[in-house]
Image (cartoon, grey):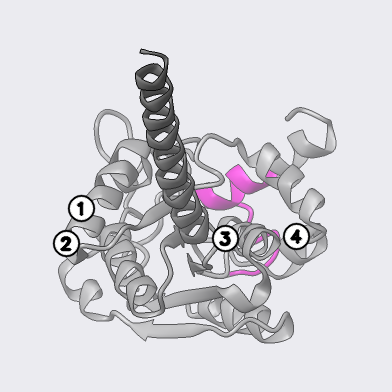
């Protein structure tokens, strides 16, 4: 009777050890995926630049691939800023043409004859700077690049705190896109959104912690009119950025 009990205990112990080993393997695989590098959607603006250096801190520069898109935006200054930043700080950047988007998603960011809204439209309308489908295209292409480079992580600087409330900047969309892209390629993709619930003041604070606040203040292009640094001071992107900077300086974050 004692022998049977001992054998049962040994069997239970063996099974428990097997389960632990399997769980450890799963955790190791998960950790490998978490740490295998990332594709960063990089525009040269405040948010994506902050995310680029956030990714560098986590994954290491050699494991971070910034990807920028030329989608026919009328101001090329942001692409120039993106290229200058990646070159100066030693990142290996990809710039991909996506100009067909201009012909199907008419808005103030792509059309010379459409002026940028200076105020948020009332009701259910989105600002005329909204580019329908843009983030969906960006994330899908970033997913393909990640898969082809053996990476499982995508970083994007979208935020629900921005004035616009763009539907493709919401957490609900990001979760859906993450699942869809993973299913479409039968390859696990994780989309990271470090700024999703941060205010602009908190984003400035994050830049300070990353040691890039001067870079953000002087060289990034957030302005819808394509002016670097503090920008035109009038468009919604500039007023949001300036308001966030003032709140950051006053410790309101």
Q: Residue at x 61, y 69 (%)?
A: 227
Residue 5 seen anywhere in this rendered image of the structure? yes
Q: CA distance from mark 3 to mark 2?
A: 32 Å
Residue 205 rendering spot, x and y as whole percentages: 76, 43
Looking at the rendered structure, the secondary structure element under dot 3 is loop
Q: Which sits earlier in the primary sequence, circle 4 or circle 1?
A: 1
Looking at the rendered structure, the secondary structure element under dot 1 is helix
Q: CA distance from mark 4 to mark 3?
A: 10 Å
Above or below, 82 relative to 201: below
Q: Which sits earlier in the primary sequence, circle 2 or circle 4?
A: 2
Disc 1 packing (10 Å; few <14; some 14–19; many ≥20): some
Residue 128 rendering spot, x and y as whole percentages: 32, 52
Q: CA distance from mark 2 to mark 4?
A: 39 Å
- Which-is-in-front pick, marks 1 and 3? 1
Q: CA distance from mark 1 to mark 2?
A: 6 Å
Name the residue tied to disc 2.
184
Q: Residue at x 83, y 38 (%)?
A: 249
Left or right of 229, for residue 157: left
- Which-is-in-front pick, marks 4 and 1? 1
Quadrant of res 124: top left
Q: Are marks 1 and 2 in contact (CB under 8 Å)?
A: yes
Q: Are marks 4 and 1 in contact (CB under 8 Å)?
A: no
Name the residue tied to disc 3.
222
| Residue range (magenta) | 227-243
Left or right of 72, for residue 42: right
Residue 132 seen anywhere in this rendered image of the structure? no
State the mark number for residue 180. Answer: 1
**41 or 108, which is in the foreground?**
41
Name the residue tied to disc 4.
217
Above or below, 169 relative to 56: above
């Amino acid at each position: 009777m004692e022998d049977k009990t001992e054998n049962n205990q040994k069997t239970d112990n063996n099974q428990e050890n097997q389960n632990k080993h399997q769980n450890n393997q799963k955790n190791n695989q998960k950790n490998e995926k978490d740490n295998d590098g990332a594709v960063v959607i990089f525009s040269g603006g405040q948010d994506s630049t902050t995310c680029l250096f956030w990714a560098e801190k986590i994954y290491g520069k050699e494991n971070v691939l910034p990807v920028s898109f030329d989608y026919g935006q009328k101001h090329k200054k942001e692409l120039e800023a993106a290229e200058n930043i990646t070159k100066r700080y030693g990142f290996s950047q990809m710039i991909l043409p996506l100009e067909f988007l201009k012909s199907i998603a008419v808005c103030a960011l792509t059309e010379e004859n459409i002026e940028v809204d200076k105020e948020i439209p009332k009701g259910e309308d989105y600002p005329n700077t909204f580019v329908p489908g843009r983030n969906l295209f960006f994330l899908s292409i970033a997913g393909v690049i990640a898969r082809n480079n053996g990476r499982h992580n995508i970083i994007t600087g979208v935020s629900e705190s921005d004035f616009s409330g763009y539907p493709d900047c919401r957490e609900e969309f990001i979760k859906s896109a993450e699942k869809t892209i993973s299913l479409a390629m039968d390859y696990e993709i994780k989309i990271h959104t470090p700024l999703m619930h941060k205010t602009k003041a908190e984003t400035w604070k994050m830049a300070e912690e990353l040691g890039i606040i001067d870079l953000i203040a002087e060289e990034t292009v957030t302005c819808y009119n394509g002016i670097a640094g503090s920008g035109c001071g009038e468009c919604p992107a500039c007023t949001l950025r300036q308001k966030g900077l003032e709140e950051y300086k006053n410790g309101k974050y």
